[in-house]
Amino acid sequence: MGNCLGAAIKSTAEIAPSELVKPPPVIKLYGPPDSFATSHIRLALLYKPVKLHFIPSETHQTPVLMYQSDVVSGSVEDILRYLDSKFPDPEAAVASAADTSSNIWGWCGEATPVVVWVVVLQHRSINWHLEKMVKWAEDMVARGGKARGDPSMGSPRMEVKKFGKSYSHLQQVMLEHAQMEETVLFQILESADRGLCKAANEEHARDLPIMNGIKEEIKTIGVMNMGSPDYLEVLSNLLSRLKRLKARKSSLMIFRSDPEKLDKQKFDWPCLL
């Protein structure tokens, strides 16, 4: 009679609940705890899919990073480029002066204020996670709410709950990011050019209804009949909202202004962190 078993369907969803995935790789970092270079690298590692084991060490005058059999030292940019080679998403290193063509803004470098570098890194991380949520939603739409996807997700209804939990975490990060921009970065830019941040504040206000609408639609999907016409319609609307939010977050409006205005300001940037 032959083999009647069909081929397993592999889900394209790339977000899995933390309790069901393998533990992240461990990276050890040695360096003086009050060093700016050490803090810079520790901050970058927060956005990488790794577990950091920081060992304060006054014997190391510059940070030293250990991963598997690799021992990496040097400048902050050297270590960040190494991290990007091992864990490319989201990218942490900024472009050098000789290679600004690969940088979105074309002016990030060693002279970039630290607070700006932090905002850029956070923004890259948000975009990366939004892309994952969009791919996950696309996979759910393609399966119509009935077929199982990744076995680790459980039933379709359980998958919706995990999707909602992942989005809630991402929404919290986006809200905290916007608050940090408004309370720290925008205050600095306003002192350089009054009215510069008005448009950015308006963009933040327009994002909130989209973000809250996504959360409400996820709740609605969770109580609907899986695979019903109404379910598919709401799921399609959810995907559209996620794509719209991703498109809005894909560009950082505040950095469309003239960066030379930042360079002319004499701020004590490290104290802002």
Image (cartoon, rainbow, N blue to C red):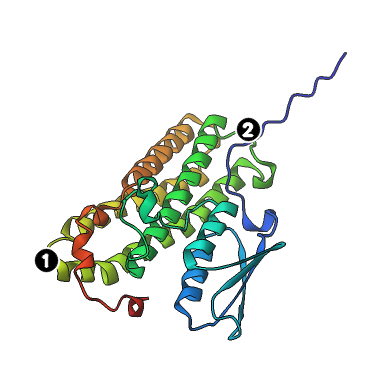
Report the Cα–Cα distance between label 1 and label 2: 54 Å
**Outermost residue toward the left in this view:** 194
Crowd around label 1: few <14 · some 14–19 · many ≥20 (10 Å): few
Left or right of residue 204, residue 174 in this image = right
Left or right of residue 128, residue 116 in this image = left
Left or right of residue 250, residue 43 in this image = right
The vertical placement of 37 against 173, above or below, is below
Residue 64 location, x and y as percent?
Answer: 60, 72
Q: Amino acid at mark 2?
A: Ala
The vertical placement of 146 against 204, above or below, is above
Residue 70 location, x and y as percent?
Answer: 68, 62
Query: Where does label 1 land, which residue?
Result: 194
- When asked about the image quadrant of residue 196, the answer is bottom left
- Earlier in the chain: of badge 1 and badge 2, it is 2
Residues 52 and 80: in front is 80
- When asked about the image quadrant of residue 145, the answer is top right
Q: Residue at x 27, y 71 (%)?
A: 183
Q: Amino acid at mark 1?
A: Arg
Q: Tell me the element at label 1.
A: loop
Query: Where does label 2 land, which residue?
Result: 147
The mark found on residue 153 in the picture is none
Where, quadrant-wise, is the C terminus in this rendering?
A: bottom left
Residue 248 location, x and y as percent?
Answer: 31, 46
**Outermost residue toward the right in this view:** 1
Select label 1 or label 2 by which is in front.
1
